[in-house]
Image (tube, rainbow, N blue to C red):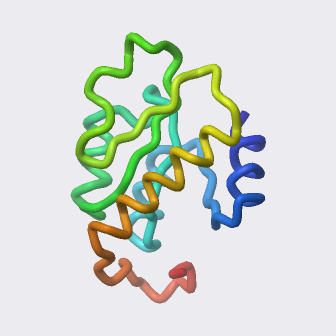
Amino acid sequence: MLEIVEQALRDAGHRVLATVDPSELVALARHVWIDVIVSDASFAGRAFVATLRSIQPQLQIVYGIAAEEHVQGYGADGVHAVVAPYTLAHLQKIVSDALASRRRSGRPPAPSHGDGLEP
């Protein structure tokens, strides 16, 4: 599934950094500007999001969630939900909405450690 979502977002013109390792994501957030994270709720729970936001406070999160009844609490504070089953077109729309939100919030300088990963 990761590869399908990754390719769909690339096809839509987004630069994608993919990982299945939460510690790698935290390391990336320290070195690279991240506009939006697309994740399932089991990978990036609220405590994990708090850690990421301590590094990049304006970070937007798009959660893929399994059921409509789990939607409560999403839609505020830069947290967006896409309910399965969903189409790639719908996911791309949610990601675009999250990017628009991020742009409205402003973009401070990206974390920089001279690794060449900055956008």
For the image shown, how many numbered marks are present on the structure? 0
The residue sitting at 29% across, 74% down in the picture is 106
Dividing the picture into quadrants, the one containing residue 80 is top left
Residue at the extreme bottom of the image, as rendered: 114
Q: From the viewer's perspective, is 3 left or right of 100?
A: right
Q: Position of residue 118 (x, y in %)?
A: 51, 81
- The N terminus lies in quadrant: top right
Query: Which of these two is toward me, 7 or 81?
Result: 81
Query: Which of these two is toward me, 23 or 46?
Result: 46
The residue sitting at 68% across, 42% down in the picture is 89
- The C terminus lies in quadrant: bottom right
Using the image, determine if residue 72 lies above or below residue 57: above
Q: From the viewer's perspective, is 100 left or right of 48?
A: right
Q: Position of residue 92 (x, y in %)?
A: 62, 48
The residue sitting at 60% across, 40% down in the picture is 91
Q: Position of residue 51 (x, y in %)?
A: 27, 49
The residue sitting at 32% across, 37% down in the picture is 75
Using the image, determine if residue 69 lies above or below residue 8: above
Query: Which of these two is toward me, 98 or 115?
Result: 98
